[in-house]
Image (tube, grey):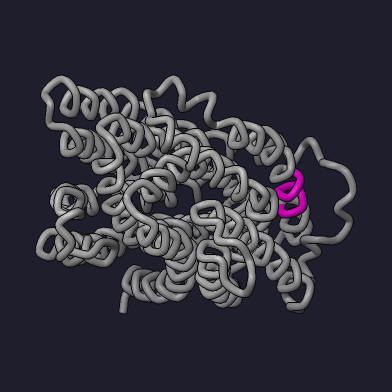
Amino acid sequence: MTRLQYIIRTEVRELTLLSGPIALMQLGQISNGFVDVLMVGQLGPASLAGVALGNATYFLLVLVCIGVLMAVGPMVAQAYGAGDWQLIGRSTRQGLWLALALAIPVASIIWNATCVWQHMYQEPATMAMAQAYLRAAVWGLLPFLCFIALRSFIEAVSRPWPLTFIIFAGIGLNALTNYVLMFGKWGLPALGLIGTGWATAMVNWYMCLAVLILVQSRTKLRSLAALSRLRWPNLAILKKLLRIGMPIGTSYGLEVTLFSAVAFFAGTLGPVPLAAHQIAMQCAAFTFMVPLGIGIGTSVRVGQAVGRKDPVRAAWAGYLGMGLSAAFMICTSLVFWLFPRSVVGLFLDLSDPANATTVAIGASLLGLAAVFQIFDGLQVSAAGALRGLKDTRIPMVFCFISYWLLGMPLAALLGFRWEMHAEGFWWGLVGGLIAASLMLGLRFKALAARLLRM
């Protein structure tokens, strides 16, 4: 066996062992939203439209914060590969300070989201329901961001399995609290959609407290001193985190802005197209969690290899991550393409005539989701490989070109001007994701070739 064959074999094994639990974590986290939509669906299309509008805003802002905090990952991964234990602890602690700094302004925006929606021609009843839902969910924002910072640290030192159990326990807690608060069980009032928001906040507090206990109770994690000597912010390390994290957060924001814009566009067509959009988007987001997990694992493997000064492993970790993501998304694309009505039937009663229009639109949108799945998987794993190299600024520019200069205008043109409506909006998503996957993949190829020549 040649050295290259050995590297490829071991990287496939290590990447799978690392990405597997991370992908499960991503599926676990998105399952909370999946459970929310399933249970809110029992309240009717109007409530589904409310949670769709609320989530479009909430996740746009929260994902930007997640992107910024993900800078903890490559910082810790490269320090771990180089054996710099002191920098690991410092980077993690500053990540917690960064979570606090992000939570304050974002919570203010979420609390007053109606001020933004009023300029987007959303229906008043939908806005009222969405705002009430968000004002409950926002109380879990800070603990969730702290959880993300600590999760990035744990993943970067290749210890993800305990997090998986924490997140999957959170799914059960979310379903239980949804049931109790939405429908008024155990003597409590029926809060409807607002109960879903309070359930989200409670689950976020649980995950934050659980991961704090995990970091302090595991000998290996405690030895890295991630939670000791917290003290005051360290401006030098915060600047490094922001230099890496702000472009990541901006890239996430650019992508999510496109998806959120499509939700807002669908909202102008009324609650039925918006509900269909929410169902199809929830399905696409669920399957996307696996390549997202692979992308995070790819970032860790690339970063650790760079820290060890092993360019061959760094390059192949990136290529193999993209290959695994594409393979998985081909499988999910086939499911969406061949069985769209069955998938929509998980959310709505197919035999109820009142749901016929929503089902038809949702099934057609799932067919388009089948088209962009592969490219979505490729772009997120390529972005993860580039993060491992701490290359985030040029990818941010590529995201701006793909999502804002191409995807969003295309969605507006096809949906409004050419009157393709919801399907036209989703073709804009397809165009943006194809462009992003090509540019990010070629960027990693160029940097990997440069790394191998050093």
Nearest the eye: 264 or 295: 264
Q: Which residues are magenta?
A: 92-97
SS assignment for the magenta stretch, majority: helix
Q: Position of residue 326 (x, y in %)?
A: 25, 59
Q: Is residue 102 magenta?
A: no
- Quadrant containing the N terminus is bottom left
**Side of 181 where 386 appears, left or right:** left
Nearest the eye: 109 or 247: 109
Which residue is pictured at 43% across the width and 72% down the height? Answer: 20
Which residue is pictured at 46% across the width and 63% down the height? Answer: 26
**Side of 78 where 312 appears, left or right:** left
Nearest the eye: 81 or 346: 346
Q: Position of residue 392 (x, y in %)?
A: 49, 38
Q: Is residue 345 above or below residue 217?
A: above
Residue 81 seen anywhere in this rendered image of the structure: no
Q: Quadrant of residue 107?
A: top right
Residue 187 seen anywhere in this rendered image of the structure: yes
Q: Is residue 79 above or below residue 401?
A: below
Which residue is pictured at 18% across the width and 61% down the height? Answer: 352
Q: Is residue 93 magenta?
A: yes
Q: Is residue 92 above or below residue 12?
A: above
**Side of 121 where 172 appears, left or right:** right
Q: Quadrant of residue 38?
A: bottom left
Q: Position of residue 18 (x, y in %)?
A: 48, 71
Nearest the eye: 156 or 1: 156
